[in-house]
Amino acid sequence: MDINEILDYSLFTVAKHQFRVITLITLLLFILGVYIFIKVVKKAIFRKSALDLPKKYSLFTIFKYIVVVLAVAIGLQIVGVDITVLLAGSAALLVGVGFGLQNLFGDITSGIILLFDSTIKVNDVIEVDGIVGRVQKINLRTTSVITREDTFIILPNSVITNNNLINWTYSSISSRFEIKVGVDYSSDVKLVMELMEKAVKEQKEVLSHPDPTVRFQEYGDSSLNFSVFFWCDEVFRVESIKSQIRVRLYEYFKENNVEIPFPQRVVHMKQPKEESNT
């Protein structure tokens, strides 16, 4: 048996179409070529210095999905499947499947929107439905995020596009944060503001520009209420940073006899009237 006979050998037959050895070899070489092509393009995209990492990832993801769809179509042609006939014959089925999978299609459409308009990018810190997390990967149907508790969550893309989304790092990797505290009415207001500013400035993660600011917010029911605002680029771990600042602030208050009051309530009780003797 010569090489031509081996290549022309029929492995199996489906609907009068013979699947030959040469077809299998061609298909395998085609898949290998597509794989190498994707790898080469990925290296070329990530080598470009003009784009930041999130944009490189989005561009490559869109490119990869387009290539995969085209490769599947060409692969079917290689094995002898007529795509036009296949689509025409399954049109009614596709309509039924479409109604059943409309949520899936909604997620995929949302994924395409996220990849194209860069509303969120890899490494962005987002908040959606009360969940704060750093974006790890944006797929066509889902987005993977890791929370501050180091828990991985898979979010359907439609959840991100259909709900109010806070992107803490959309325009900058730094954001402004606030710490509130109430002190006793007998406290020295200027001293309190100085201690709050000092406690924040001594935290190494707090940015020096813009400068932290302290505000006397209001006269509360049982306390004078202050807020200190500061900028930080450690957005993802900021809750731990705020905790450290609160501890330092508590120590400064204690050293300077600044009291944080408990809520006070005054209760008046009426004495029952004595019944008169008859």
Image: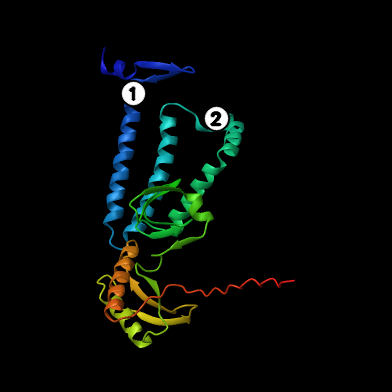
As drawn, the residue found furthest toward the front would be 278
Vertical comparison of 105 with 230: above or below: above
Residue in the image at 33% along x and 23% along y: 22
Q: Which disc number belongs to residue 22?
A: 1
Residue 53 place in picture, x, y as percent: 31, 58
Count of numbered circles in the view: 2
Q: Among all residues in the image, which is located at the extreme right?
A: 278
Q: Earlier in the sequence, mark 1 or mark 2?
A: 1
**Residue hosting label 2:** 85
Residue 209 location (% of width, % of height): 31, 79
Is residue 208 visible from the viewing direction of this image?
no
Q: Is residue 96 visible?
A: yes
Could you say which quadrant of the image residue 91 lies in? top right
Question: Vertically, is 232 above or below 131?
Answer: below
- Where the N terminus falls, by quadrant? top left
**Residue 262 in the image, given as x and y percentages of width and height:** 42, 72
- Label 1 element class: helix
Where's the C terminus, which quadrant? bottom right
